Amino acid sequence: MDAVEYEMLRHTWFPVARVADLKNGVTSGSILGEELVVYGDGASVTVAEGFCPHRGVALRLGQVSDGALQCPYHGWLFEAGSGRCTRVPSLPPGRDRPHTALRTYPAEIAYGLVWSCLAAPFLPLPRLPGYVDESWQIGAGEPYTLNCGMRQLTENFRDRAHFPFVHGDTMGDVAQVVEPYRIARDGWRLGWTSSMGSEKMPEDLAEEFDHHLDYRLTLPMFASICVSSPSGGRRLVAQVTAPVSADGLRVRQFWLAGTDAVSAEQGAELADVLGYERQVFEEDHPIVENQRPIEAPMDLHSQVHTAADRFSITYRRVYAELLESYKAGRR
Ligand code: FES
Ligand code: CO
């Protein structure tokens, strides 16, 4: 990625871990090559640099003690929020502690994920569509690490034409022809709708064919698909991809699944939806890790497109606009 994109992504919210992955109050994450430690009680969390300022031990090996992060090597304590060092156990009473603190980053919890950004965010934290309210059940699936670009993976999730070739085992006999679709745009959000018949979705998820799909994307990379079945129940899957390496060619794919109250009443279990979507993603992984270039090229002339690719072309164009807007705001 070029210097402007790198800089813009430093100012972008990304998930770094699932709340559920806090072990002894601690877990780790990474954005653009910066290794981070995440600590807290799950209701509030701190995101900080991943290594102890004393002798550089990985703080993800530590634990939370009285709300503070304790380094596993010499037991220094770093308080929640500020990252300030509040105790150095080896010092005799009355001796001054070194004035030091972990570098901390903005931290938010949303949808069971801990979000952070390396520098002041230039866009708000992205949200699921407004119809996903408290009556929905939302779960965060186990994230995957992939050798693939963030935009490449985001395009894959939005790409309808690959379903019959990649997802035969999970989706069955999906129509190969992609009917023309129009993309609506609202600021940095894109959306469109389509329909899909499939015979292989598990029966408790979908008893009939002909599903209505609502695609949403908030740039740079927060994507969701909501599937409405003819009986009125809705299921949602969302994908949010975070660049973990500085060159952006290694990513962590976080994802959510959800069921609305109607589909829950009809017997859809969130665990089944998570299990099904996991299978779907696993079918995509050999594809997205074997594309060249590894990141989707911004130069539209370097690849060949068809009408079915309207989304990825729009995404690339709007992403270029986002970069421009970021650059303009920086001046
Ligand atoms: Fe962390 Fe010494 S390395 S307390
Ligand atoms: Co796919």
Image: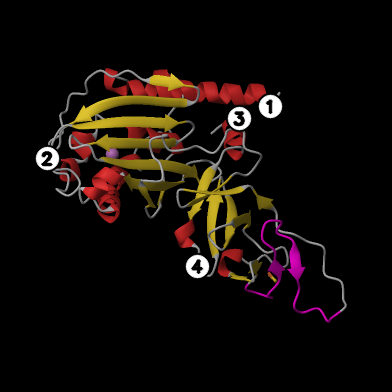
- Answer whether labels 2 and 3 touch (C-beta < 8 Å): no
Q: CA distance from mark 4 to mark 1?
A: 39 Å
Q: Which residues are magenta?
A: 72-93
Q: Earlier in the sequence, mark 2 or mark 3?
A: 3
Q: Secondary structure at mark 1?
A: helix
Position of residue 43 relative to residue 71, above or below, is above
Q: Earlier in the sequence, mark 3 or mark 1?
A: 3
Q: Main secondary structure of the magenta part?
A: loop
Q: Quadrant of ligand 2?
A: top left
Q: Residue 30's spot in the image, x, y percent? A: 54, 51
| Residue pictured at 17% horizontal, 44% vertical | 201
* Quarter holding residue 287: top left
Q: Is residue 112 left or right of residue 124?
A: left
Per the rendering, the mark at residue 199 is 2
Q: Amino acid at mark 1?
A: Arg
Q: Which residue is mark 4?
A: 23
Nearer to us: label 3 or label 1: 1
